[in-house]
Image (cartoon, rainbow, N blue to C red):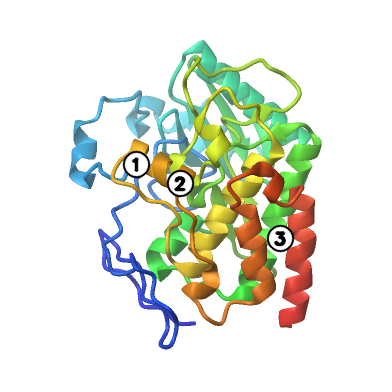
Amino acid sequence: MKRSKPHAPVPTRPMPAAGAKRDPQATRPMPGRGESHLRGGTHGAGTAGESGDWSLPAESLESLPAIAITNLDDTDGRIGERYTILSMLGQGASATVYEVRDEHTGDTHALKLLDLDSQVEVTRFRREQALLRKLEHPNLVTVTDSGEWDGREFMVMTILRGGSLLDWLRDSGGGMDYVRACRLFRGAAEALHQAHLAGVVHRDIKPGNLALEPGSEEKLLVLDFGIAKSMNTSASLTDAGMVMGSPAYMCPERLFSGAKATDSWDVYSLGVVMYEVITGTPLFRGRSWMDTMTKIQRFTPPFISTIRDDAPPALDWLISEMIAKEPQGRPSGCDVIARRLLRIERQLG
């Protein structure tokens, strides 16, 4: 279903197709999303964007407290002896991502350089490196090198040539083709299942952390395991009472920091992203974090078929199960989601 592009910088929710039931909020302007990257495919530069606090005007971002910014001038164009900086791909709350050339091989990579030197951030950064080296899946980025430069940690990854789902939503307004959505999210679900088998919950699945990678077969890559958490330990890098992640994509039980991390958290978040990509309508958006959290707890979203009346019933039911309020109402794992998406994809031809 063709949808018109929203007008920048503040996009509007696309209207349903003729004959479809209208979303009562579809004509309301959709507040701008937080900026965390300069362009798509930035390998997870941090969690500054998509925070869920949509009441913050874009112009007020300039008045936020400064973070440790890495300028190209600070690097003298090089990271160590091996990597020459070609451009800056993106910047988040804790790291900057550069496009670099490996002088040993001539290959181009993405280099993620940690901007903050707190022990907690360093530990998170090293844990993300170790996890990505441990996990092997076509829908995950590959770490090729890591080290320390000028007292700061860095890791080198396969460079992404596509943009994020956040970029795609801004450009298209949503309404992804059903077969394409099934194929792409099936790959992402399989990658998350691999992480879950390793005992790790991502905890920050959102459009900005899912990247469209072009090629002979387009893929949806899962990025940024920076705040991932083990399901097998009570150890935490998060202060008591702090909830890490993006509230608009969090399941209800996560709103209370005492809840134990489970793979059901990622199931829910992936469902919220699928809902938004397919309908063009964000599932939960409040005037503030608290308002967003209240909506997540109390508001029952409509089926996608109330917004797109041609929605396949099997896909409609799958997404409604993924975003169930109670964990026991959701699919038992991302492997189950992947199998169901494959079945739907085949039915759609």
Q: Which residue is mark 1?
A: 291
Q: What amino acid is found at the position of numbered circle 1 in the picture?
A: Asp
Q: Which residue is mark 2?
A: 298
Going from N to C along the chain, the mark reached first, 2 or 3, is 3
Q: Which residue is mark 3?
A: 186
Q: Is residue 300 above or below residue 3?
A: above
Q: What amino acid is found at the position of numbered circle 2 in the picture?
A: Arg
Name the residue: 69% across, 68% down: 217
Q: What amino acid is found at the position of numbered circle 3 in the picture?
A: Arg
Provide residue 235's location: percent of width, then percent of height.
66, 15
The answer to whether residue 27 of the structure is visible from this angle is yes
Kindly state the secondary structure of the residue where label 3 is placed.
helix
Task: Please rate how many residues cluster around mark 2, counting C-alpha atoms within 10 Å: few if below 14, some from 14 to 19, many from 20.
Answer: few
How many marks do you count on the picture? 3
The answer to whether residue 218 of the structure is visible from this angle is no
Q: Is residue 29 above or below residue 108?
A: below
Task: Please rate how many residues cluster around mark 3, counting C-alpha atoms within 10 Å: few if below 14, some from 14 to 19, many from 20.
Answer: many
